[in-house]
Image (cartoon, rainbow, N blue to C red):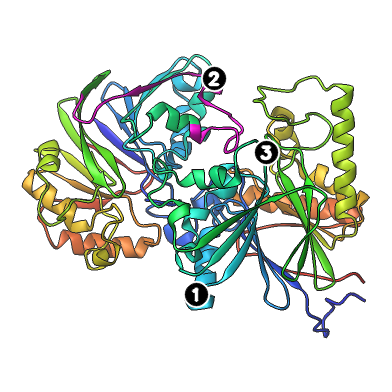
Amino acid sequence: MKVRFWGVRGSFAMSGREFLRYGGNTPCVELQTDDGQRLVIDLGTGATELAKSLMGTALGKGTGELPILLTHTHLDHIQGLPFFTPFFLEGNHISIHGVDPDGTSLEATLQNQLAPHYSPLGGLENLSAHVSIEAFQPGDRLALGPFKIRTAAMPHATMRTTAFRIEADGKVVTFLSDVEYPDPEAPDPQAVALAMGADLLIHDAMHPDDEYDLRRGWGHSPVCAGIAVATAALCKRLALFHHSPDATDDQIDALVASAQAQTSIPLFAAAEGSYVEI
Amino acid sequence: MSSGAPGYNFPRMQITFWGVRGSYPVPGPQTVRYGGQTSCVEVRSSGGGCLILDAGTGLRALGQKLARESGGAAGRYHVLLSHVHWDHIQGLPFFEPAYIPGTTIAVYALLTAADELQQVIGGITRHEFFPVPLDSVPAHFQYHEVEPGVRMTLGEFLVLPIALNHPFGAVGYRIDCDGASVAYVADTAPFTDVLHKQHFLRGLEPLSDADRETLAQIRADLVKAITRCDTVIYDTHFLPDEYKRFPHYGHSTPEHALALCVEAKVRRLVLYHHAPGHSDDLMDQVAKDYAAQGEAVGVEVITSFEGMELDIEGAP
């Protein structure tokens, strides 16, 4: 299995010279099995770059299928949806899987994103591809093609986000972004269960540990939280993810160095365009 | 001689471009020089008055600058929205002054449906989309409906909203201050192929005679409104071959903008709202080509980039 990062930036897309190495696009991650089947997590602005790379596949000809998992519907995780080219090719079959936000549904939320006030698309019904919105309950297990997925709800500011444990090709990738545990230094039992033995743990690392106190309650983790989960769950590698919009390339380099000094688990900061062989 | 000539130090308006991109922000190596953030322009009077045109992602950096300048003190800000498509409003929740108690943020926009502006604009921070609702930030948001053709006085600025041709409606603004004028014309399609209303367009639809009359009226009103403006900032999202493929998307080309500016005797046209796929190298070519085309017809044409500052000169 291969993981490719198309957007790694949290909250806000950042352009400019200081963000070129790690990238400024908001979250979007592609998983691909050895035989070429794909799964996408989140549709931040990175999805616009993913879309370009898919034009040479069946999705560029209107004969493709693609399952997409959404961790949640905060804008930085869906703002690439209206510009994801496979939606505009008739014949594609795309399914979007996520949890209903409190008090509304996943479908109503995405409809609202495309409402005529906000988008010339006007609504999901105007996407040319066949698009199905499939809500699930946190804790449900999903089987999407070759991908076997376990899900769990995690605390994230005023809402809950969904974390995923994804198995394919005999490998495990765990995705825990946009999470803030009650105590980041104490490994959260649910997170540890989801990450147990993972070949790669992709974890929210928005805040340097020494800045976390200023930003407690914003819904994101300090770097030490991902290390605590990876350690308790015996993960083989850790990818720091959801970089702060203000973190320059040099600052992320420094963050990685100080994080690696805390653990013997190999870790790296996810960088846009890069991929990891699992 | 114009008041902007060297050696003269007349007070005048200044504008700064914080986001020049259309549709969505585009980070990366191809947008380093022209910038990747979406629509946002700051207008300053010589007396320090401030108007903000559109609240795209460029607004975040502007907000950081304003908060720095005020030393964290409360202020009063006017934000004029052309319309509420995401690329023109998604900077609002990231506007630092919104988190400074005592601050007032007056938002001006066109009411395009029965929904209240507060619901529509506040709706971008419903809990599914953003953790902090605009209704509950420390700053106080006020919402004001604008009407095309009806002038408003905002501090030192005289502001005229102008109807445009864009899906679900949009307005431009002519701003007069310090004896000079600047107009902001985004987003708009030209006035020949499509009359944008309130339904989704898969492609071109036949125009009725009434549609043609409406388009001619919008165009005539626009030309009148921007007549003899020193500087006109215009939605030139598309190059001509792109426009041919997407005439129903609601955007113009530099040719469309230049024709209007010639007719309205505008001194300077600023190309704005660049398509997200237009790389720095392509924009260099665009800047060069249209500067020459403008020169041939007596209009200075410049291509906006993030961080660009312009003085607005008074009439000669």
* Spatial CA span between label 2 and label 3: 26 Å
What's the mark number on residue B112?
Answer: 3
Q: Amino acid at mark 1?
A: Arg
Instruction: Give whichever of discs 1 and 3 has the lower sequence position.
Output: 1
Q: Is residue B106 above or below residue B249?
A: below
Q: Quadrant of the C terminus of chain A?
A: top left
Residue B170 image offset from top left, x and y in percent: 71, 43
Q: Badge 1, how many Cα within 10 Å: few under 14, some, many 20+?
A: few
Residue B243 placement, left or right of A259 = right
> Marks 2 and 1: same chain?
no
Main secondary structure of the magenta stretch: loop
Residue A255 image offset from top left, x and y in percent: 26, 62
* Spatial CA span between label 1 and label 3: 35 Å
Residue B178 placement, left or right of B142 = right
Tell me whether circle 2 and circle 1 mark residues in contact (CB < 8 Å): no
For the magenta stretch, what is the residue range?
A112-140
| B101 drawn magenta | no
> Marks 1 and 3: same chain?
yes
Which chain contains the residue that carries disc 3? B
Q: Amino acid at mark 2?
A: Ser
Mark 2 secondary-structure assignment: loop
Residue to which mark 2 is pinned:
A128
Residue visible at 64% across and 36% down in the picture? B114
Residue B296 image offset from top left, x and y in percent: 90, 53
What's the mark number on residue B68?
Answer: 1
User: Quarter of the image holding residue B113?
Assistant: top right
Which chain contains the residue that carries disc 2? A
Mark 3 secondary-structure assignment: loop
